Structure formats: C-alpha cells, structure tokens
Amino acid sequence: MSLDFHKDHRLLFGTVLVVFVVLTLIIAIWPAWWVQTNNQPLPASERMTDRERRGLQVYVSEGCVYCHTQQVRPLPQDTSRYGRPSAPGDYARLEPTGLWRQTPSVLGTERTGPDLSNIGERQPGATWHHIHLYQPRALVEGSVMPAYPWLYQVKARPDSGDTVVPVPDEHGPDGGAVVATERAEALVAYLQSLQQPPLPNRGTTTSAEAETARDGPSGSQVYQSRCASCHQPDGSGVQGAYPPLTGDPVVTAQDPTRHIEIVLYGLEGKTIDGVSYPAAMPGWGDRLSDEAVAAVVNHERTSWGNDAPTVTAEDVAAVREEGPPDGE
C-alpha cells in the first residue's frame, strides 16, 4: 500500500496530528513534568499561605506579570539591585491556581518595572505597598506604573478592623479615608512573601552586601536600595506616611545613638513635629552589616544640608550589643 499524501487528506492530517502530539510530548510536556518532579523547594523556603496564594491570583489577574520579572540574572546590574541570581528551587512551590489553569508564569519577559524576586526583603512594609498600589506617583514621582484604585474603597468612617492607607493629600480622595479591600490585602501579602531564601551552602547575597563587596559600603547606594523609596531620594519624605530626614532632630543630633537604633531596630507610630506617621519603618539590623549601617547613617547625617558628626562601624557594633531600647 502506497502512502499518497496528495490524495488521501485523512492520511495527511492524521500524520500531521500524530507528529504534533509526539513533538508536544517530547518538547513541552515531558520536560515540564521532569522539572516539576525533580525540582525541590529550597530548604529555607516556606509554602504560601492561603492569603498569599489568593494574592498570587490577584497578581496574575491584574497583569503584574507583564511589566515585572521574577528572575534575577547572574549579572552585576541585577545582583547589585535585586538580590542573588535566581535558582530553580525559587519556583518549586508555585502551583496551578485552579484545576484547569496552568502554573503562573511569574518569571515574566520584560522589566518596565523593577524585578520583584526579593521585593519583600527590599521593601517589607505593608503601608508602602498599599500606597504604591493606590497611586504610584505618591511615592515615585516619575513612575509609569498604572494606579489600582479599584483595589481600595473610600470610607467616610473606616471600621475598626480596616487597613487605612495614609495616602498623601494631593493623591488621595477629596473626602474620606482610603481602605484596603481583601484583594489588596492578599496582593500585598503575596508581595511581602517574595523574599529569596538562602541557597544551601552558599547563603544569600543581598543588594547591600553586593554594594560592600569591594571598597567598603557606599552610603548612597545603601540609601537608594533601602531607604529612598520611603524617605525619597532627596530625604524629603512623604506627607503623612514617612517623615523627612532633612533637618530631622534625630538625624542632626550630636549624639548619633538614637539614629543608629532606629536604623537597626526600626520605628513605628511616632509623632514628629506634630505629624503622626502610622507607617512602620522596618529594622535593618538583621539585613545590614555594621559597616553598611554606619555608611547609610553617615550619608543621611551629611546630605541635603544636614551637617552632623559621622559614626564608625564600631559605634554601630556598640549600639547593636546594647540591644533595642526598652519598649521597642
């Protein structure tokens, strides 16, 4: 029997179908199955909570994957800003979001916005994420990220259990308070969960550590990677959310102890010059070395018109040894 593809259309299309299925199994399905069954989660990683999993669904449905990657390349321009290079184990805990849905493609293809692989470590505060989602320009003047106000409600009288977002007046509603919805809470929980666990036997190379690898820490670089998103690149702060550092009495004090304590252990719910700042500042003591803390403290004490005595790594070590102040 001869095979006449020119006249037997069933034979032609049947052959094409069989070849297509075989190639799909060889090129797509089998490699994907092999990766999923042979890729183990990193030992220090944790399974996502139900809320974080819902946040991942919001992340995908709102199109965040179109502008943000979650893949750090082993290149200096990546590791100096975003964390250590990505590893297969970083994605081992991802699962399909539904019975008929594929595993979310969080790796992304484009960086219109910064990589988010380690955003929960770089920016651990929930308040910052909420303000940024409601109106990115409130924190980053030149941001091209779209606002997501539909993830929030405006209430004249927020309930006691509501998460009220301290949006600056010029970016907030004319009346009432901005309150996070459950979808916003879930999305922020997911973003906060994006923290690179250390690689076995290698540890984690953070952006701040990369900055200190050669000639010692650069206070300007540490500030830009850790502090500028809240306190702004020029130290001006954000109205009602993050206090300015220009002329701040703690930053300009002759005794730097309190300044070092705040950088090491954080601060929350303080009133400064009559303005209440509800947003919590994270402590960086477990993420930055003594040298890096000294560098960023000196940067703040000598920039934007500030002129205060500088500190050394030994000063930071002494404050660290004392531990956090009482009540903090």
Image: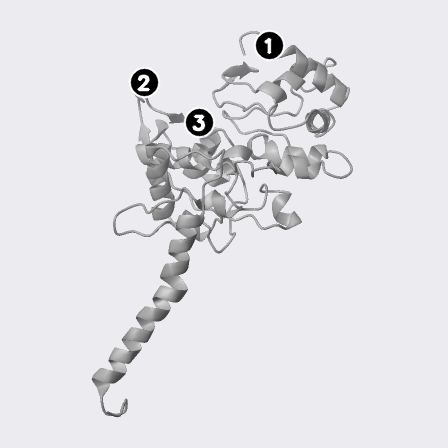
Which residue is denoted by mark 3 in the rendering?
A: 166
Q: Give the mark, 2 or 3, whose residue is nearer the N terminus.
A: 2
| Mark 3 vs 1: CB contact within 8 A | no
Going by the numbered disc 1, the residue's amino acid type is Pro
8 w.r.t. 19: above or below: below
Which scheme is used to colour this image of the protein? one colour
In the rendered image, is residue 186 in sight?
yes
Q: Secondary structure at mark 2?
A: loop
Query: Mark 3 or mark 1, which has the lower sequence index?
Result: 3
Quarter occupied by residue 178: top left
Near mark 1 (Cα within 10 A), the count class, few <14, some 14-19 or many ≥20, is: few
Nearer to the camera, 198 or 127: 198
Label 3 vs label 1: CA separation? 27 Å
Residue at 56% across / 38% down in the picture? 200
| 244 in relation to 96, above or below | above
Of mark 2 and mark 1, the one earlier in the sequence is: 2
Tell me the tag on residue 325: 1
The picture places residue 317, in percent across and down from the top left corner, at 71, 18
Amino acid at pointer 2: Ser
